Image: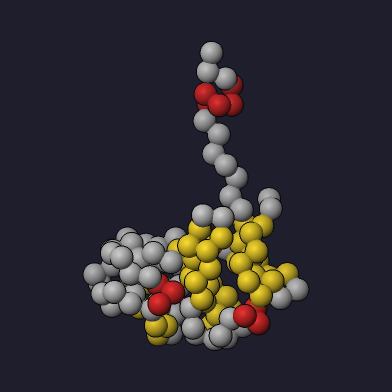
Amino acid sequence: MSRIYLCDFEDLTPEEPLLVEVEGLELAVIRKGDEVFVIDNQCTHGPGSLSEGDLDGYTIICDFHDGGFDIRTGEPVIPPCMVPVRTYEVERDAGAIMIAREAEAVTCARKFGSG
C-alpha cells in the first residue's frame, strides 16, 4: 500500500497541532514528545477545527465548543462531543511523517461490469 506524505517531524512543534491538507483530507497532525498522532481536523460535533484546539495531555480540546477527543483513539472524552473523530496510523521514515493511502472501494458493478 502506498503512503501519503504529510510533513517532516522537525516541522512539528510539540503539543501544537498542525493543519495539513493533502489529497482531499484535512488533518490535524500532533506531536506529543517523540510520538506523532494524526486525526481528522473537523470536529464531529460542530464547525470546530481541531488543529486550532489546545492539547491537554492526550486530549485535544475543540476550539469551538470545548469538547475533547483522545488523540490516540479518536474517542470523545469531553462533552458535548459524542461521535469519535477518525484517527490514522502514522508511519515515520527518515523523519518524514506519512499515513497509509486507503485502497479505493470497488463495487460489484465496477468490478464485474454492469451489463
Q: Residue at x 56, y 85 (%)?
A: 13
Q: Residue at x 44, y 74 (%)?
A: 51
Q: Residue at x 65, y 64 (%)?
A: 5
- Along the line of sight, the residue nearer the viewer: 46 or 72: 46
Rendering coords of residue 41 (x, y %) = 43, 66
> Looking at this rendering, what residue extends furthest in the top direction?
115
Look at the picture and state if 7 lies above or below 83.
below
Here the colouring is secondary structure
Position of residue 1 in the picture relative to residue 106 (left or right) = right
Q: How many marks?
A: 0
Rendering coords of residue 64 (x, y %) = 29, 74
Look at the picture and state if 23 lies above or below 92.
above
Position of residue 50 in the picture relative to residue 47 (left or right) = right
Position of residue 83 in the picture relative to residue 105 (left or right) = left
Asked whether the viewer can see residue 87, the reply is no
Look at the picture and state if 71 lies above or below 46.
below
In the picture, residue 48 is in which quadrant?
bottom left
Q: Residue at x 33, y 62 (%)?
A: 44
Asked whether the viewer can see residue 19, the reply is yes
In the picture, residue 6 is in which quadrant?
bottom right
In the picture, residue 90 is in which quadrant?
bottom right
> Looking at this rendering, what residue extends furthest in the left direction?
80
Rendering coords of residue 52 (x, y %) = 40, 77
- Along the line of sight, the residue nearer the viewer: 24 or 80: 24
Rendering coords of residue 78 (x, y %) = 29, 75
